[in-house]
Image (cartoon, grey):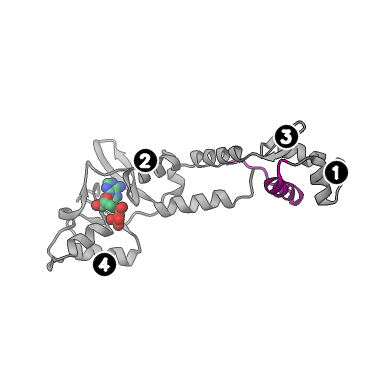
C-alpha cells in the first residue's frame, strides 16, 4: 500500500484545512505563526499528493473524496492469502456436543466440517448449534452433518481474491465467516480448507487503514 508519511507541520496544515477550509495560504500561515514562503513547499506537497485541493481565489480545501478513494483502493490491493486466519475444522461425523466444546475451546464463532478425506463438507455456526441444542437431549448422538450448511451451498473465498471481494461476500450473504479454500486438481468442485476470513478480520484491516496517518 503506497502512502506518504506527513511531517508534523503538514499534519497541522491538513488539520487546519479540514476544520476551516476553504482557507487561503496566507491565513494558514497566520494560524501557524509562519510566513507564507515557509509554508509554500508543504502546501505544494499536500496538493500534489491530493490530500488538499487549491482553487484560485478560494483557497485550500480538504479533498474528502480523494481520501475515500485512497482507502478503498488500499482495501482492493490486499490479498486474502495474507490475512487469512487458522481454520478450526471438525469431522462431519463429530457430534454436536463435541462441536460445541470445540467452539468454546478454540474461541471461534464458526467451525468447518470436513469429510474423511479432509475436504470441505459443511459450515457450523453458533446459531446452528443453538438451534440443534433446543429441545434436543442427545447432542452426543447427533452428528454435525445433520445440522450444518452443506456443500454446494457454502460461500468460499480463494487465497488470490482480494479482501474487498471477501468483505462483499460476507455482507451480501449475511454470514460471519468464509472458509479460504483451494480446489483439488484431481477432483473438481472439491476443496481443501486452508484458512478463514471473518468479520473481525475485515474490522481489523479497516482500523489499520483509517489509523494510518497517510494521504
Ligand atoms: P451465526 O449463526 O452465529 O449468526 P452466521 O451468520 O455466520 O453465524 O451463520 C448464519 C447461517 O449461515 C448458519 O446457518 C450457517 O451455517 C450459515 N453459514 C455461515 N457461514 C457460511 C458460509 N461461508 N457459506 C454458507 N453458509 C454459511
- Measured in 3D between alpha carbons, the distance from the residue under mark 3 to the one under mark 2, in whole angstroms, is 43 Å
Residue drawn at the location 82% of the way across and 46% of the way down: 29
**Marks 2 & 4, CB-CB < 8 Å contact:** no
Q: Say what secondary structure mark 4 lies in.
A: helix
Q: Quadrant of the N terminus?
A: top right
Callout 2: 10 Å neighbours few (<14), some, many (20+)?
many
Disc 2 target residue: 158
Residues at marks 4 and 3, CA–CA distance in whole angstroms: 60 Å
The numbered mark at residue 54 is 3
Residue 38's disc is 1
**Local secondary structure at mark 2:** loop
Instruction: Point out the stretch of residues depicted in magenta.
Output: 1-22
Give whichever of discs 2 and 4 has the lower sequence position: 4
Q: Is residue 104 magenta?
A: no
From the image, state whether disc 4 or disc 3 is nearer to you: 3
Horizontal arrangement in the rendering, residue 168 relative to residue 65 (left or right)? left
Amino acid at each position: 500500500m503506497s502512502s506518504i508519511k506527513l511531517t508534523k507541520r503538514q499534519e497541522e496544515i491538513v488539520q487546519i484545512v479540514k476544520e476551516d477550509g476553504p482557507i487561503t495560504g496566507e491565513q494558514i500561515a497566520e494560524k501557524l505563526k509562519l510566513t507564507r514562503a515557509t509554508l509554500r513547499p508543504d502546501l505544494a506537497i499536500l496538493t500534489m499528493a491530493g490530500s488538499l485541493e487549491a482553487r484560485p481565489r478560494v483557497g485550500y480545501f480538504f479533498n474528502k473524496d480523494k481520501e475515500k478513494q485512497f482507502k478503498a483502493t488500499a482495501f482492493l490491493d490486499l490479498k486474502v492469502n495474507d490475512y487469512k486466519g487458522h481454520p478450526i475444522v471438525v469431522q462431519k461425523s463429530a457430534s454436536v456436543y463435541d462441536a460445541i466444546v470445540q467452539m468454546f475451546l478454540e474461541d471461534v464463532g464458526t467451525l468447518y466440517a470436513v469429510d474423511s478425506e479432509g475436504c470441505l463438507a459443511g459450515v457450523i455456526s453458533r446459531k446452528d448449534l443453538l438451534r440443534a441444542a433446543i429441545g434436543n437431549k442427545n447432542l452426543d448422538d447427533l452428528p454435525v452433518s445433520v445440522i450444518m450448511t452443506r456443500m454446494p451451498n457454502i460461500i468460499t473465498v480463494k487465497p488470490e481474491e482480494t479482501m474487498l471481494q471477501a468483505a462483499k461476500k460476507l455482507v451480501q450473504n449475511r454470514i460471519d465467516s468464509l472458509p479460504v479454500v483451494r480446489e483439488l486438481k484431481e477432483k473438481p468442485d472439491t476443496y481443501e480448507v486452508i484458512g478463514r476470513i471473518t468479520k473481525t478480520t475485515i474490522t481489523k484491516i479497516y482500523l489499520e487503514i483509517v489509523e494510518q496517518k497517510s494521504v
